[in-house]
Amino acid sequence: MSVMAAKTYNVLFLCTHNAGRSIMAECLMRRWSNGRFQAFSAGSHPAGAVSPHALRVLASFNHKTEGLRSKSWDEFAQPDSPVLDFVFTVCDSAAGEVCPVWPGQPMTAHWGIEDPSATTGDDDRILKAYRRAYVELESRIKIFSSLRMEALDRLNLQNRLNQIGGHHAGKEEFIQAGAFG
Protein backbone atom coordinates (compact mmCIF):
# COMPACT_ATOMS: atom_id res chain seq x y z
CA MET A 1 0.00 0.00 0.00
CA SER A 2 1.47 3.36 -0.97
CA VAL A 3 1.23 6.38 1.26
CA MET A 4 0.44 9.68 -0.43
CA ALA A 5 3.15 12.26 0.21
CA ALA A 6 2.09 15.38 2.06
CA LYS A 7 2.02 18.60 0.04
CA THR A 8 5.05 20.84 0.21
CA TYR A 9 4.01 24.50 0.41
CA ASN A 10 6.04 27.30 -1.20
CA VAL A 11 6.44 30.36 1.01
CA LEU A 12 7.87 33.72 -0.05
CA PHE A 13 8.94 36.36 2.50
CA LEU A 14 9.10 39.93 1.22
CA CYS A 15 10.90 42.99 2.47
CA THR A 16 11.91 46.09 0.55
CA HIS A 17 15.67 45.39 0.45
CA ASN A 18 15.72 41.61 1.02
CA ALA A 19 18.80 42.06 3.16
CA GLY A 20 17.73 41.28 6.74
CA ARG A 21 14.26 40.33 7.94
CA SER A 22 13.10 38.43 4.86
CA ILE A 23 16.44 36.59 4.66
CA MET A 24 16.18 35.58 8.33
CA ALA A 25 12.58 34.46 7.78
CA GLU A 26 13.67 32.31 4.83
CA CYS A 27 16.31 30.61 7.00
CA LEU A 28 13.92 30.16 9.91
CA MET A 29 11.25 28.59 7.69
CA ARG A 30 13.81 26.13 6.38
CA ARG A 31 14.70 25.20 9.94
CA TRP A 32 11.15 24.79 11.27
CA SER A 33 9.43 23.47 8.14
CA ASN A 34 9.95 19.76 8.77
CA GLY A 35 9.95 19.37 5.01
CA ARG A 36 6.43 20.81 4.69
CA PHE A 37 7.55 24.19 3.33
CA GLN A 38 10.02 25.43 0.78
CA ALA A 39 11.16 28.93 1.71
CA PHE A 40 12.18 31.87 -0.45
CA SER A 41 12.77 35.58 0.11
CA ALA A 42 12.87 38.63 -2.12
CA GLY A 43 12.57 42.41 -2.14
CA SER A 44 10.93 45.13 -4.16
CA HIS A 45 14.20 47.10 -4.26
CA PRO A 46 16.90 44.57 -3.35
CA ALA A 47 20.00 45.89 -1.64
CA GLY A 48 22.25 43.62 -3.68
CA ALA A 49 23.84 42.11 -0.57
CA VAL A 50 22.67 40.45 2.62
CA SER A 51 23.19 42.51 5.77
CA PRO A 52 26.38 41.48 7.59
CA HIS A 53 24.46 41.87 10.86
CA ALA A 54 21.75 39.46 9.68
CA LEU A 55 24.45 37.01 8.63
CA ARG A 56 26.11 37.25 12.05
CA VAL A 57 22.82 36.62 13.85
CA LEU A 58 21.99 33.68 11.58
CA ALA A 59 25.46 32.19 12.12
CA SER A 60 25.10 32.62 15.90
CA PHE A 61 21.98 30.42 15.72
CA ASN A 62 23.77 27.84 13.52
CA HIS A 63 21.94 28.58 10.27
CA LYS A 64 23.57 27.75 6.97
CA THR A 65 24.12 31.04 5.17
CA GLU A 66 25.88 29.88 2.01
CA GLY A 67 24.02 30.91 -1.11
CA LEU A 68 21.88 33.56 0.56
CA ARG A 69 21.48 36.59 -1.67
CA SER A 70 19.43 39.74 -1.95
CA LYS A 71 17.11 39.32 -4.93
CA SER A 72 14.19 40.99 -6.66
CA TRP A 73 10.64 39.83 -6.19
CA ASP A 74 10.39 39.88 -10.00
CA GLU A 75 12.22 36.51 -9.97
CA PHE A 76 9.11 34.98 -8.39
CA ALA A 77 6.57 36.53 -10.76
CA GLN A 78 7.86 34.73 -13.87
CA PRO A 79 5.84 31.99 -15.62
CA ASP A 80 8.49 29.39 -14.69
CA SER A 81 8.70 30.52 -11.03
CA PRO A 82 7.66 28.20 -8.21
CA VAL A 83 3.90 28.28 -7.66
CA LEU A 84 3.54 30.14 -4.38
CA ASP A 85 1.14 29.06 -1.65
CA PHE A 86 1.91 31.86 0.81
CA VAL A 87 3.46 35.34 0.55
CA PHE A 88 4.27 37.24 3.74
CA THR A 89 5.49 40.83 3.92
CA VAL A 90 7.72 41.42 6.93
CA CYS A 91 8.22 45.16 6.52
CA ASP A 92 5.68 47.95 6.36
CA SER A 93 7.22 49.48 3.23
CA ALA A 94 6.83 46.30 1.15
CA ALA A 95 3.31 45.80 2.51
CA GLY A 96 2.32 49.18 1.08
CA GLU A 97 3.70 48.52 -2.40
CA VAL A 98 1.85 47.08 -5.36
CA CYS A 99 3.16 43.54 -5.63
CA PRO A 100 3.56 41.57 -8.84
CA VAL A 101 0.99 38.97 -9.74
CA TRP A 102 2.23 35.76 -8.15
CA PRO A 103 1.81 32.40 -9.86
CA GLY A 104 -0.69 30.25 -7.96
CA GLN A 105 -2.74 33.04 -6.33
CA PRO A 106 -1.10 32.57 -2.92
CA MET A 107 -2.58 33.50 0.42
CA THR A 108 -0.99 36.67 1.78
CA ALA A 109 -0.51 38.29 5.15
CA HIS A 110 1.49 41.12 6.66
CA TRP A 111 3.80 40.12 9.50
CA GLY A 112 5.44 43.49 10.14
CA ILE A 113 8.70 43.38 12.05
CA GLU A 114 10.53 46.52 13.19
CA ASP A 115 13.43 47.29 10.84
CA PRO A 116 16.69 46.45 12.63
CA SER A 117 18.72 48.24 9.94
CA ALA A 118 17.19 51.52 11.12
CA THR A 119 18.86 51.06 14.51
CA THR A 120 21.66 53.50 15.25
CA GLY A 121 24.48 53.19 17.73
CA ASP A 122 27.29 50.77 18.30
CA ASP A 123 27.57 47.30 16.84
CA ASP A 124 26.17 45.62 19.97
CA ARG A 125 23.02 47.73 19.87
CA ILE A 126 22.49 46.98 16.17
CA LEU A 127 23.05 43.25 16.68
CA LYS A 128 20.54 43.30 19.53
CA ALA A 129 17.94 44.78 17.14
CA TYR A 130 18.64 42.03 14.60
CA ARG A 131 18.36 39.36 17.31
CA ARG A 132 15.03 40.85 18.43
CA ALA A 133 13.73 40.69 14.84
CA TYR A 134 15.02 37.12 14.56
CA VAL A 135 13.22 36.01 17.73
CA GLU A 136 9.95 37.64 16.69
CA LEU A 137 10.14 36.03 13.25
CA GLU A 138 10.99 32.67 14.79
CA SER A 139 7.97 32.82 17.06
CA ARG A 140 5.61 33.53 14.15
CA ILE A 141 7.18 30.92 11.89
CA LYS A 142 6.99 28.23 14.57
CA ILE A 143 3.28 28.93 14.99
CA PHE A 144 2.68 29.01 11.23
CA SER A 145 4.65 25.83 10.53
CA SER A 146 2.66 23.96 13.20
CA LEU A 147 -0.72 24.74 11.60
CA ARG A 148 -2.65 21.75 10.29
CA MET A 149 -3.28 23.19 6.82
CA GLU A 150 -5.47 20.29 5.76
CA ALA A 151 -7.85 20.92 8.67
CA LEU A 152 -8.47 24.59 7.80
CA ASP A 153 -10.61 26.02 5.04
CA ARG A 154 -9.24 29.05 3.18
CA LEU A 155 -11.11 31.62 5.29
CA ASN A 156 -10.02 30.11 8.62
CA LEU A 157 -6.47 29.75 7.36
CA GLN A 158 -6.44 33.43 6.31
CA ASN A 159 -7.68 34.39 9.77
CA ARG A 160 -4.85 32.37 11.35
CA LEU A 161 -2.27 34.03 9.09
CA ASN A 162 -3.55 37.46 10.09
CA GLN A 163 -3.55 36.51 13.80
CA ILE A 164 0.04 35.33 13.57
CA GLY A 165 1.00 38.69 12.09
CA GLY A 166 -0.72 40.59 14.92
CA HIS A 167 1.67 42.28 17.30
CA HIS A 168 -0.36 41.60 20.42
CA ALA A 169 -1.31 37.97 19.98
CA GLY A 170 0.51 35.46 22.13
CA LYS A 171 0.82 31.72 21.68
CA GLU A 172 -1.97 31.12 24.19
CA GLU A 173 -4.38 33.11 22.00
CA PHE A 174 -3.49 30.94 19.01
CA ILE A 175 -4.09 27.77 21.00
CA GLN A 176 -7.46 29.08 22.18
CA ALA A 177 -8.33 30.04 18.61
CA GLY A 178 -7.61 26.47 17.53
CA ALA A 179 -4.52 27.27 15.47
CA PHE A 180 -2.88 24.07 16.68
CA GLY A 181 -5.96 21.89 16.56
Image: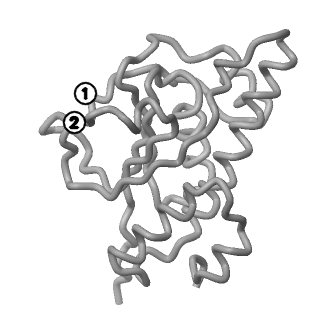
Q: How many marks?
A: 2
Q: CA distance from mark 1 to mark 2?
A: 7 Å
Q: Nearer the viewer, residue 134 or 173?
A: 173
**Residue 141 location, quadrant:** bottom right
Measured as percent of width and height from the top left, residue 24 is found at 60, 35
N-terminal-most mark, 1 or 2: 1
List x then y, in percent, for residue 80: 16, 38
The quarter of the displayed image where residue 163 is located: bottom right
Left or right, 62 with reference to 3: right
Q: Is residue 170 above or below residue 79?
A: below
Could you classify mark 2 by the number of other residues whose Cα lies within 10 Å: few (under 14), some (14-19), or many (20 or more)? Answer: few
Label drawn at residue 100: 2
Residue 65 place in picture, x, y as percent: 61, 27
Which label lies toward us, 1 or 2?
A: 2
Residue hosting label 1:
74
Are discs 1 and 2 less than 8 Å apart at CB? yes
Query: From the viewer's perspective, is 149 left or right of 120?
Result: left
For the point 68% across and 59% down, which residue is it? 168
- Badge 1 crowding class, 10 Å Cα cut-off, few under 14, some 14 to 19, many 20 or more, is some
> Label for residue 36?
none
Task: State the SS at label 1.
Answer: helix
Pick out the residue farthest to the bottom: 1
